[in-house]
Amino acid sequence: MTWDFDTFKGSWSDMNQEMNIPSTLGKKLLESLTTVLGDRLPEGFKPAVQVAADLRFGDYQSNAAMVLAKRVGEKPRDLAQQVVAALKTEGMAEASIAGPGFINFKISPEFYAQRLMEMLADERLSVPKVSEAKTIVIDFSAPNVAKPMHVGHIRSTIIGDALSRIARFLGHTVITDNHIGDWGTQFGMILWGWKNLLNQEALNTNPIAELLRIYQVVNAKCNEQPELRETCKAELVKLQSGDDENLQIWKRCVEVSKSGLQKIYDRLDIRFDYWLGESFYNDALGPLVNSLLESGIAQESDGAVCVFEEEGREPSASSPFLVRDKDAWKPNPCIIRKADGGFLYATTDLATLDYRIKTWHADSIWYVVGAPQELHFRQIFDIQRRRGITGDFRHIAFGSILGDDRKPFKTRSGELISLEDVLNEAVERAKKTIDEKSPDMSADEKDRVSEIVGIGAVKFAELSQNRISDYIFNWDKMLSLQGDTAPYLQNSCVRIQSIFRKLGDNRSRGNANIVLEVPAEIHLAHMLSRYAEIVPMVLDDCKPNILAGYLYDLAKAFHSFYESCPVLKSEANVRSSRLALCQLTLDVLRHGLGLLGIQIPDRM
């Protein structure tokens, strides 16, 4: 069989005019390939174009001919030859065939040059906005009131913030909600401790530490004096019944806790649109449980109210309400009201979902919460489905942070390390390095740069990891000026900034004439042009490490370019072109790191 491609020959300009395709190179190649294959494509078959695994043979590649050949009875290489012969790239790319039928695309230096000049002139660096903007609620961080944030909050807080920044930049309406734990049994002990043990001066100095102290002291006393535990329970009942004194103390606890937490968020440059804690939904919990009972979704069991597996559904491992025990399936219910009348996290989370959909009209709700909560969210989302409430609900899970012993990262005494201590340690270590490398810096500048470098190092160490994986928290690697670290990327930006300082900060922008001749220039151009493809990819599976890895590769490409291509010592036209490459690299690194919540110092 030989295909007649004449009918399906397309050009880049025709294709873009007719389809209004976002101007990323990979999408242009994909759409051209699809146009060439035309209506001969079998139903459900979608050709793909990826970045080439080996850039020596091209910039992009496709195995479409190899996959499609089996379906149409052609030899893969013969089909690939027909496709390549039909493609018209109009100076953008040269198509060739490798191996049994891979189609390689090598972008022309002239096209890259034009592409980069467009990026320089565009404040979005040619990154397209999404075609269909959504309202996305992102639930992240969520510490408990009266307790300090610890190392376990790093992942949720930093991943959630990065996803929020990226989604907003891509054109979505993003609502961030810090769903703090501000209600629960621990408040009985805190209320009694506030009335009997509070150090007002300590509360003013470090409120969270003081609230934690009185909780720990009262908890220890309760173990020694069982009657005190009953007294604390009575304080909790008074709070839940609306006792004015206890309500005022509780409100003060929440207020001072939020103030202490905000200091951490300020250091991390993180802002929330809302802080709607668990207590916000108290009035909705009773009616919600009654509604679930009336609809038959929930039922009483031993005095508690539970949701069991849906009747008529075939038992399987995909059900969140069943667990396999030897050869039998056993119930694994979701409890939404305890036998003593108390509500649980599941009840609050269902009410929270309702509120976010009804009040904020959320199209999508993302929970950036650790992997151990997977079953909890599977149950919650399934209950919503059974209630007829549909939507894009996502549990964005992540693994654990480990110490060098590959166990959860803790102090020697076995306690979780506070997040504030982690940040302080990172800044102090960064300052030691800066003292060694830049002794001429003023004390104030050292403090400012140390804060930027230390905080950036913690963030990048987190965001450069696949969020699903556990990772080892290693101070030396995190703060190294070499390798996949924030200081390495920040130092790349500082190096570029120093080039322009030598020129009196004379920047090259949209009027630059870029000419690419040397392989290092062309490779850097290839990396820069990919930014428009990389940023949208992050939200495909909510993985900021895709962007972090790209920025590291870009910085490596720049260092190779800088070492092999003189900038300031080159001739006028060449120097102008290379300065434009430097400027665009700085723009992309600064913007990409900004999407990850990482700042750039002027000096290091």
Image (cartoon, helix red, strand yellow):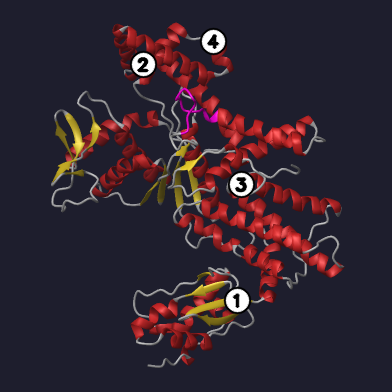
- Residue 325 on image: x %, y %: 17, 42
Residue nearest the observer in this picture, 587 or 481: 481
Q: Can residue 21 be seen by looking at this rendering?
A: no
**Residue segment shown in magenta:** 409-420
2 or 3: mark nearer the eye = 3
Badges 2 and 1: C-beta atoms under 8 Å apart?
no
Q: Earlier in the sequence, mark 3 or mark 1?
A: 1
1 or 4: mark nearer the eye = 1
Q: Which residue is mark 2?
A: 188
Callout 4, which amino acid? Gln
Residue nearest the observer in this picture, 538 or 68: 68
Badges 4 and 2: C-beta atoms under 8 Å apart?
no
Q: Which residue is mark 3?
A: 485
| Gap between marks 2 and 1 measured at Cα | 68 Å
| Gap between marks 3 and 1 measured at Cα | 31 Å
Label 3: few (<14), some or many (≥20) within 10 Å? many
